Image (cartoon, coloured by chain):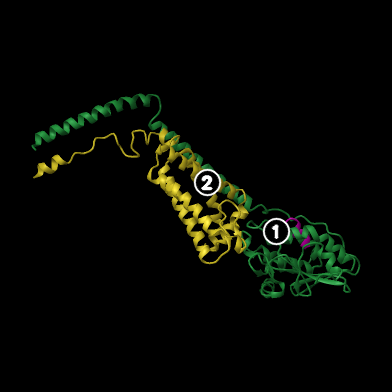
Chain colours: A yellow, B green
């Protein structure tokens, strides 16, 4: 049951990254404008970030889709989401009127079109999906499963070894 | 608890473990014979690394190609209608005035060569404007504003193209140059045209004066263009509300120094004196 929930979280987060990355890479000019509008990076970094971000999102999406290294991909996803949330918060706090560009669009918009609370709430929701997968990365239909990572019943470690019984040695040293 | 008992307990535990590991060992030996386990991991890792590398390399190549779409291109020449007799085109500072000296009405057009809405404006109205110029009804003062100068990748296309168009005005080819730049406009967020390409366009239009290339390469009018833009963007009469309160944006058409609303049949209304 929890595995099934985890699977939904994993596939849901994968869909988020794949769609977000695909939309961004299909309009590289718009992505550049969107990153520039945050007005937070030094101008020399805007281009590289605008190139790298869609690729990173697609990569995370693919890794989540096939379910490999789920825990670590979830950690990376969570970190990226925290950075994005922070970027939206800083533009809101500074009074910029921009669209976050998370799923296309981006750049300057009119003040009554800004949707900062909704964008932050949505990204926080995605973060919760990543959080679940960080804590409990076991899911169904995953490459992790095929490789046998979760096959012995525990999420990691050599769970087939007997637990050490230290009580003998302690009492023996008395 | 004695050492002997401790060792016995340890031996029993080890045996249990060995027992379970033994069955595991047996199972994995069978599995290995079938080519899974470690082999699976190796295959998965290799395939994974190859896929990731392909994704990243492919992605970067694709993004750069998309961004640099204008690289190495020749800016195509736009064929504009020739001017009627009596039409004068002259640079005055950083403004280019085109029209017959006794034209009925004068409009100021503020545009940025990178601005996509200016591109649409040009596509929609430039031919009509040129017809009205030829008919002696209209004179146009073209103001090239580097509003989006930071929005090309690399930066600077708006300013370079503005400067180049002024150089073209000095060589008597402003309208053809201006129309060509708008006809095949670079996209925002992407590479514009570099100075060599702008010079190439001038050559294709028949400009032979070496001063043209010098002016473009030296950015002769850059400071003036920026200073003028500073004044323009602070001019209250030119501001319109694009949704963020009054501000200066492009394209702006002004009559008698005041921005006009371009909805409907504004051009004919201006000429008839009904607007502005």
Q: Which residue is mark 1?
A: B116
Residue range (magenta):
B177-184
The quarter in which the C terminus of chain B is drawn is bottom right
Closer to us: B117 or B216:
B117
Residue B211 visible: no
Q: Where is B81 relative to B10, above or below?
A: below
Q: Where is B32 relative to B163, above or below?
A: above
B91 with respect to B230 (left or right): right
Contact flag, marks 1 and 2 (Cβ < 8 Å): no
- B181 magenta-colored: yes
Mark 2 burial class by Cα count in 10 Å: few <14, some 14-19, many 20+: many
The quarter in which the N terminus of chain B is drawn is top left
Which residue is rendered at x = 88% and y = 65% of the image? B134
Q: Which residue is mark 2?
A: A16
Residue B108 image position (x, y, % from top left): 77, 70
Numbered circle sitting on residue A170: none
Which residue is rendered at x = 35% and y = 24% of the image? B30
Residue A53 visible: yes
Image-quadrant location for residue B155: bottom right
A137 with respect to B202 (left or right): left
Q: Nearer the viewer, mark 1 or mark 2?
A: 2
Closer to us: A34 or A56:
A34
């Amino acid at each position: 049951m929890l595995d099934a929930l985890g699977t939904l979280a994993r596939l849901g987060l994968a869909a988020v990254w794949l769609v977000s990355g695909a939309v961004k890479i299909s309009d590289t000019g718009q992505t550049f404008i969107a990153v520039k509008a945050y007005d937070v990076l030094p101008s020399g970094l805007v281009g590289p970030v605008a190139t790298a971000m869609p690729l990173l999102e697609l990569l995370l999406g693919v890794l989540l889709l096939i379910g490999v290294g789920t825990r670590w991909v979830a950690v990376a996803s969570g970190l990226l989401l925290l950075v994005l949330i922070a970027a939206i918060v800083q533009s809101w706090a500074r009074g910029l009127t921009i669209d976050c560009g998370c799923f296309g669009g981006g750049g300057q918009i009119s003040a009554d079109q800004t949707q900062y609370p909704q964008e932050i709430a949505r990204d926080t929701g995605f973060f919760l999906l990543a959080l679940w997968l960080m804590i409990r990365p076991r899911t169904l239909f995953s490459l992790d499963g095929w490789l046998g990572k979760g096959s012995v019943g525990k999420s990691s470690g050599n769970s087939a070894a007997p637990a050490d019984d230290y009580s003998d040695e302690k009492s023996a040293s008395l | 608890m004695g050492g002997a008992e401790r060792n016995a307990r340890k031996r029993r535990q080890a045996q249990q473990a060995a027992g379970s590991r033994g069955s595991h060992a047996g199972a994995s030996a069978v599995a290995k014979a079938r080519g899974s386990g470690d082999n699976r991991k190796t295959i998965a890792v290799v395939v994974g690394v190859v896929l990731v590398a392909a994704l990243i390399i492919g992605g970067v190549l694709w993004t750069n190609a998309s961004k640099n779409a204008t690289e190495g291109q020749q800016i195509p020449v736009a064929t504009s209608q020739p001017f009627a007799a009596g039409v004068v085109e002259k640079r005055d500072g950083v403004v280019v005035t085109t029209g017959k000296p006794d034209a009925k009405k004068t409009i100021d057009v503020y545009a940025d060569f990178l601005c996509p809405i200016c591109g649409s404006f040009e596509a929609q109205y430039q031919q009509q404007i040129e017809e009205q110029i030829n008919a002696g009804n209209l004179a146009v003062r073209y103001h090239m504003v580097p509003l989006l100068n930071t929005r090309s990748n690399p930066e600077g296309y708006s300013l370079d193209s503005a400067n180049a168009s002024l150089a073209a005005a000095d060589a008597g080819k402003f309208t053809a140059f201006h129309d060509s730049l708008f006809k095949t406009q670079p996209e925002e967020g992407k590479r514009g045209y570099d100075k060599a390409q702008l010079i190439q366009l001038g050559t294709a239009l028949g400009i032979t004066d070496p001063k043209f290339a010098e002016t473009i390469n030296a950015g002769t009018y850059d400071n003036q263009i920026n200073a003028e833009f500073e004044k323009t963007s602070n001019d209250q009469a030119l501001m319109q509300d694009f949704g963020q309160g009054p501000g200066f944006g492009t394209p702006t058409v002004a009559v008698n120094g005041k921005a006009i609303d371009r909805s409907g049949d504004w051009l004919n209304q201006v000429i008839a004196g009904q607007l502005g």
